[in-house]
Image (spheres, grey):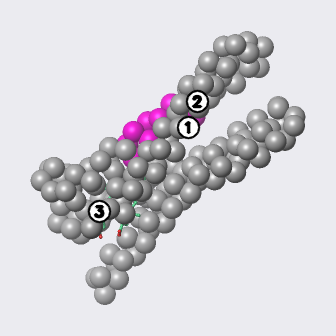
Amino acid sequence: MRDDVWTLVRFIHVLGAATWVGGMIALGAVAVPAARSAGDRTAGRQVLTSAARRFGVLGALAWVVILVSGFGLLHHRNLGLGDLTASDYGRRVLAKLCLLLAMGVVTALHALWQGPRARRLEEAGDLAGARRWKLLGAGFDSFLLLASLATLWLAVSLVP
Ligand code: HEM
């Protein structure tokens, strides 16, 4: 019975991970090209912003679920934060934790600072300024995609 509970926690953890990583891939590989092919730039941008906002809610939920269930799984393995540097398994989990925290910070900067700034400049007609801020946004997006894939790689190589 207790094993079933931990299987459920692992299931929830992997569901959160699938939602997070799958969402990143879907936004990058599906929503961005679809918005770009819309022809009308303004309409395309609106669709993309709306898709990103909707994923933002689901992604934030997945982020919290991954973190909470991840600490649950660590507890199940009798590991605390202080033990994580002592084994290869622990160091991989620590790397996942650092990447997840960094992804949270970058997503918040993207949604609350860089994105609104780029939009405001574009609406004010400062296209050169908007382009610079959008370049930073593309950097954030690339980091998020690569960090998501790196975390998944670390996760699947936890146990040889
Ligand atoms: C985006 C970030 C993360 C992703 C994509 C992710 C993904 C996964 C996946 C797919 C597994 C299953 C691996 C397997 O059974 O072979 C797993 C296991 C695990 N994850 Fe994560 N994870 C993430 C973040 C975290 C964090 C932040 C923690 C700790 C606070 C954590 C702790 C664990 C532990 C301890 C296990 C192993 C469970 C066990 O040994 O039974 N994960 N993770």
The residue to which callout 3 is attached is 158
Q: Is residue 45 above or below residue 81?
A: above
The magenta-colored residue range is 100-112
Circle 1 crowding by C-alpha within 10 Å: few under 14, some 14–19, many from 20 = some
Give the main secondary structure, helix, strand or loop, of the magenta stretch. helix
Residue type at mark 2: give it. Gly
Q: Is mark 3 within 8 Å of ligand 1?
A: yes
Say which residue appears at 77% left-offset and 46% top-offset.
34
Per the image, is 106 magenta?
yes
> Nearer the N terminus, badge 1 or badge 3?
1
The residue to which callout 2 is attached is 137
Say which residue appears at 29% left-offset and 47% top-offset.
95
The image's mark for residue 23 is: none
Residue 80 left/right relative to 118: left
Q: Is residue 46 above or below residue 15?
A: above
Quadrant in which the C terminus appears: bottom left
* Residue found farthest to the bottom: 1
The reply to whether the C-beta atoms of the residues labelled 2 and 1 are less than 8 Å apart is yes
